[in-house]
Amino acid sequence: MKFRKHRIAAIAAAFVMAAGASQAATYTASNVVAEGTSYGTCATYSLAACDANQRRVVGNALGETDGRFYSLGLGGRLTLGFGAAMFGPGALLTLEEVTFGGPQAGGHREAVDVYSVLGGVATFVQTVYNTAAVTSLRIANSFDHIQLVDATLREYAGTRSYDGFDVDSVKVTIAPVPVPAAGALMLAGLGGLAMLRRRKAAV
Ligand SMILES: [Ca+2]
Ligand SMILES: [Ca+2]
C-alpha cells in the first residue's frame, strides 16, 4: 500500500512537471533601469499638451495595458526590467502604443528602436511604428532588459509629433516548451518509476 501511494505521487509529480513546462509565461515591465527623455520640443508646441494625460509619468509604461502611457520624448530612451534575471533566445516582446485617433490624425507619426540588453550590451532588434497599436516581435538572443530609443524624427522627417513614441505597456512572453520535450519529461518520470518498481521487486 505504501509503495502504491508513492507511485501515485510520482505519477502526479510527473504530470505537473510536464504541464508546467508546456505553458507560456508573460512578464510585464516592472521597473525602470534607466531613463533619458528630451521634452524640449514640448515647450515650443504646448507645454500643457505635453503634461496632458500624465504622459511624463514613467510608471505609466509599467504593468498591464491600461490606457495610461509614457511619452519617450523625441530621441528619448528608456530601459526596462521585468522581474526576471534573464530571458533565453526566442522570447516574444509585445509593445503597446497609444496615439489618440491613430497616427494619421494630425500627422502624429512616431517610431521607436527596440534593443535587447544583456549584461549592459544593447543589441538592435527592430524599429516599431505607431501605425499599429500593438506590435509583437521575436527576440533571437538572450537578454535581461529591453531598451527603447525614440526614432520619430529619423523615420518621419515631416512628423507633427512633439513628444515621441508613447508606451502603454511592454511585455515579454516566454515560448512554451515544445510538447515532445514536455512528453520526454513525463517519460523520464515514468522511467524512474519503473526503476523503483524493479528495485522493490529485487528486495
Ligand atoms: Ca507621442
Ligand atoms: Ca500603461
Image (cartoon, grey):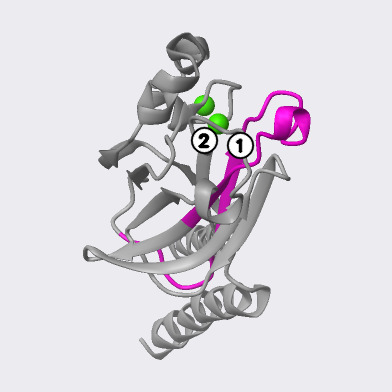
**Which residue has dot 2 on it?**
167
Q: Compared to 10, does 32 lie above or below?
A: above
- What amino acid is labelled 2 in the image? Val
Q: Provide residue 10's location: percent of width, then percent of height.
A: 48, 64
Residue 21 left/right relative to 144: right
Residue 77 left/right relative to 103: left
Camera-side residue: 166 or 30? Answer: 166
Circles 1 and 2: CB distance less than 8 Å?
yes
Q: Earlier in the sequence, mark 1 or mark 2?
A: 1
Q: Which mark is residue 135?
A: none
Residue name at image x 46 percent, y 28 percent: 70
Q: Is residue 169 visible?
A: yes
Q: Compared to 130, does 190 lie above or below?
A: below
Q: Is mark 2 within 8 Å of ligand 2?
A: yes
Residue name at image x 57 percent, y 69 percent: 177
- What amino acid is labelled 1 in the image? Glu
Q: Compared to 152, does 98 lie above or below?
A: above
Q: Quadrant of residue 196?
A: bottom left
Residue name at image x 38 percent, y 25 percent: 59
Q: Provide residue 7's location: percent of width, then percent of height.
A: 50, 66
Q: Which residues are magenta?
A: 86-113
Q: Provide residue 57's location: percent of width, then percent of height.
A: 38, 21
Residue 136 left/right relative to 88: right
**Which residue has dot 1 on it?**
97
**Quadrant in which the C terminus is drawn:** bottom left
Residue 77 left/right relative to 100: left
Q: Secondary structure at mark 1?
A: strand
For the residues labelled 1 and 2, the Cα–Cα distance comes to 5 Å
